Image (tube, helix red, strand yellow):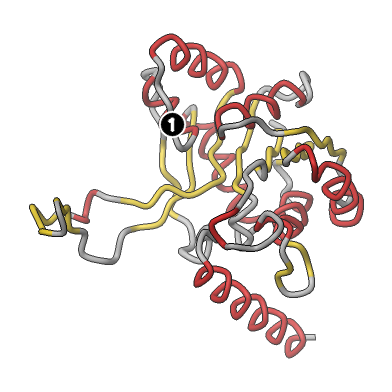
Amino acid sequence: MLVSGLIAAGGSGTRLGDSEPKQFLDLGGMPVIAWSVDVFSKASEIGEIVLVCPADYMEKAREIASKYCIGKSYTVVAGGTTRQESVRNGLQASSRDMNWVAVHDAARPFITAQEVDAVCLMARDLGAAITASRIVDTIKEIHDQIITRTLDRSDLVAAYTPQVCRKDDLLSAYEIADKSGFHATDEASLLENAGINVAVYIGSSLNFKITTADDLQLARALAAWQKERRSADA
């Protein structure tokens, strides 16, 4: 089983307030997106890498892929106006020889090759799987800044990526969503909407998504710590 590794970096990343998308900002001496490219190139279950990025950054993405994608073929395609459109563009550009896809957010730089392989193997066994983290905080539901109830966190997880499934299943899920006008923020939601069961692989909470300026500051501190640890182990 070889999987098309689709790294979604099509968003503008404007919430950080920088002049360029967050996936191209520096993180420990590498662009944020390069971290995922490097990891996916090392994952044994990944057969190719498809980078989906803003049209204005395709050449920059190719330069990054040529430097950090070692030993595997890669393709760079332009994203759409939504995540669903961007991932669909990536699917259409992926190899027909590979029947599975692992969709990963470029803004989650701290995924490991071991986690990528593990969620791919779980998907192979169970049909579809996502990476997630257990909820450790107490979760409150609010209305007009007033708590309306406290949720039982024992049955809750935070959905991460990669999210892995058969390409045909995801394409069918897109068609169903198109007909009903359903919009999703991740691939698992599309599969759930299509009646497809999705398993959960519990991974590291370090696989967080860089969304805010605080997230970027935390990511840079973590990248510096990892670099120091590697130097100490060398």
Asked where in the image residue 16 lies, by quadrant, the reply is bottom right
- Relative horizontal placement of residue 25, taking residue 64 as reference (left or right): left
- Give me the residue at 53% from left, 47% from top: 161
Asked where in the image residue 67 lies, by quadrant, the reply is bottom right
Please state which of residues 212 and 230 is positioned toward the viewer in this rendering: 212
Tell which residue pokes out farthest to the left in this image: 148
Please state which of residues 33 and 40 is positioned toward the viewer in this rendering: 33
Please state which of residues 51 and 161 is positioned toward the viewer in this rendering: 51
- Give me the residue at 57% from left, 76% from top: 217
Tell which residue pokes out farthest to the top in this image: 179
**Dot 1 amino acid type:** Ala
Tell which residue pokes out farthest to the bottom in this image: 232
Q: Is residue 166 above or below residue 163?
A: above
Q: What SS does tag 1 mark?
A: loop
Q: Position of residue 117 (x, y in %)?
A: 63, 47
Q: Is residue 42 above or below residue 217?
A: above
- Give me the residue at 21% from left, 55% from top: 154
Q: Position of residue 9 (x, y in %)?
A: 67, 45
- Give me the residue at 76% from left, 57% from top: 34
**Total tally of numbered discs in the picture:** 1
Residue density around tag 1, few if under 14, some if 14–19, many if 20 or more, within 10 Å? some
Quadrant where the image shows the C terminus: bottom right
Quadrant where the image shows the N terminus: top right
Q: Position of residue 63 (x, y in %)?
A: 90, 51
Disc 1: which residue:
184
Asked where in the image residue 39 lies, by quadrant, the reply is bottom right
Q: Position of residue 72 (x, y in %)?
A: 86, 43
